[in-house]
Amino acid sequence: MSCVLVVGGGGREHALAWALSRSRHVDRLLVAPGNPGTASCRRTRNVAVSPADIAGLVTLCRRESVDLAVIGPEDPLAAGIVDALDAAGVATFGPRAACARLEASKVHCKGFLIDNGIPTAAAEVFEDPHAALAHLASRPDVPVVKASGLAAGKGVIVPETPDEAAAAIRAMLVERRFGSAGEQILLEERLRGREVSVLAFCDGDRFAVLPAAQDHKRLRAGDEGPNTGGMGAFTPSPAVDDRLIRQIGSRVIAPTLAALERAGTPYRGLLYAGLMITGDGPKVIEFNCRFGDPETQAVLPLLRSDLFEIMVACATGTLGDVSIDWAPMASVAVVMASAGYPVAGGEPAAISGLEAAAGEGCVVFHAGTGIVDGALHATGGRVLSVTATGPDVATAAALAHRGVGAIGFEGAQHRADIGRSPAGVHR
Ligand code: AMP
Ligand code: GLY
């Protein structure tokens, strides 16, 4: 039997812990730092070590004889946690820092895509606000403005007018709203089409694609409001069929893995390609080097195979030896967020109705929850993901929204259109 450490404390990590706790190989599961949801998984214990404390996590793995470490969020990956755990002899699911740069630096990623002939939007890089504004004034279109570094999914602004684009440039390069993440920016051609996410388990050489999920980045129904980390997801995505998956595999995922292997930095872990399906075929919007949140909460409940076996195979280059089987069903995850999300934290608010949601058949994954005065509270950001499965998206969505309706906390925000509208179409 094995001991697994999951690093992180969001809804994605709750879903990972939930799935790993069902493995027939896992008898101990640690989550650092976890949340009240992970604490309630079978055979699972939260450990108060921050994902940023790499030395502390290495020590924890040694002390607890961890057999496999699974890294949820991007920051520790970019900081080299996998390199440190590898050096300590701990098998790890996640890419080394050299690969995680694909997510941590959009400027690096753009160069990588272009150098390797992988389709993506044209972009220019700027550090000087005057040069960026002059370039903006010279172009006929309104570009997307992107902070190069990690900004918790909020460093991309899709302006409608040149004035909005100029304001975004100033916010990043003059006001430094994204700190060092916005020291370099990209002005990128705006792509039109349908946005899809394709996630793949990778063992350095081979890959296996997960069921395609559709994320909902904007805060409000109808794709209105600011970009967020993601307000909900559903699978299967009607925008993706087997032919498109094969095309994305051969034009995007395979050349990416081949280029990284040639560079001596094979990619092991989960590769998440954010794509726009344009009139010219799929183009990469971004790579994430980890599972998506909330895509993971939607997709993992459909996994019939043993997640631990798949992750060990990725870590050891033996993905060809495992079979990966998904229930041929639909799944919908609806995020409930705190009042001020994505801008402010908000006061802790008591949560009610979780048992009723479970009674509806929903699985509720925790993120921004905490115990205050002995009771479960929403503590800011994305708070819960309410997931339901069913024979089709409409049925799963009806169930998930019934679950959301059963749950209450002061100021809760959610999108009523998750799983009910063709989200992600960019005209
Ligand atoms: P990212 O953080 O790079 O995924 O960007 C956040 C969101 O902004 C994406 O999910 C898209 O909806 C949108 N976006 C980013 N780049 C572009 C682009 N070049 N054209 C159109 N929309 C984009
Ligand atoms: N839901 C988008 C992400 O995880 O980046």
Image (spheres, grey):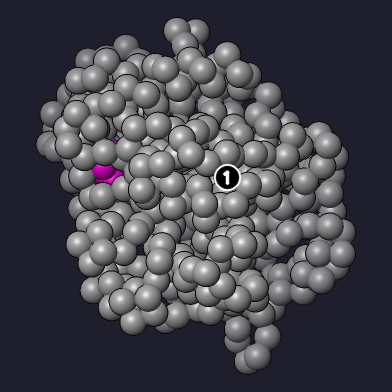
Question: Residue extending furthest bottom?
Answer: 373
* Rendered view: 413 above or below 211: below
Q: Residue at x 34, y 82 (%)?
A: 63
Determine which residue is flagged by label 1.
Answer: 295
Is 103 in front, or is 154?
103
Residue 389 rendering spot, x and y as whole percentages: 77, 46
Q: Which of 47 and 165 is in front in this view?
A: 47
Please name the residue shown 20% across and 62% down the image: 87
Q: What stretch is highlighted in magenta?
A: 99-103
Residue 116 makes an appearance in the image: yes
Quadrant in the rendering for residue 187 = top left
In this view, 385 is above or below 58 = above
At which x and y percent is residue 204? 32, 37
- Looking at the image, residue 68 sits to the left or right of residue 219; the answer is left
Which residue type does callout 1 highlight?
A: Glu
Locate the C terminus by quadrant: top right
Q: Is the shortest distance between ligand 2 and the CB of mark 1 under 8 Å?
A: yes
- Report how many numbered discs are placed on residues in the image: 1
> Which residue is pictured at 49% across the width and 33% down the height?
208
Q: In the displayed structure, does residue 286 sit left or right of residue 17? A: left
Q: Is residue 282 above or below residue 261?
A: above
User: As rendered, which of 366 and 172 lies closer to the eye?
Assistant: 366
Q: Which residue: 40% across, 66% down?
A: 67
Q: In this view, does 130 lie to the left or right of 357?
A: left
From the image, give the main secondary structure of the stretch colored magenta. helix
Q: Residues within 10 Å of mark 1 (few under 14, many from 20)?
A: many
Residue 60 placement, left or right of 137 = right
Q: Is mark 1 on a helix, strand or loop?
A: helix
Q: Is-magenta flag for residue 370?
A: no
Q: Where is residue 147 in the image (x, y as percent from the top left)?
A: 28, 41
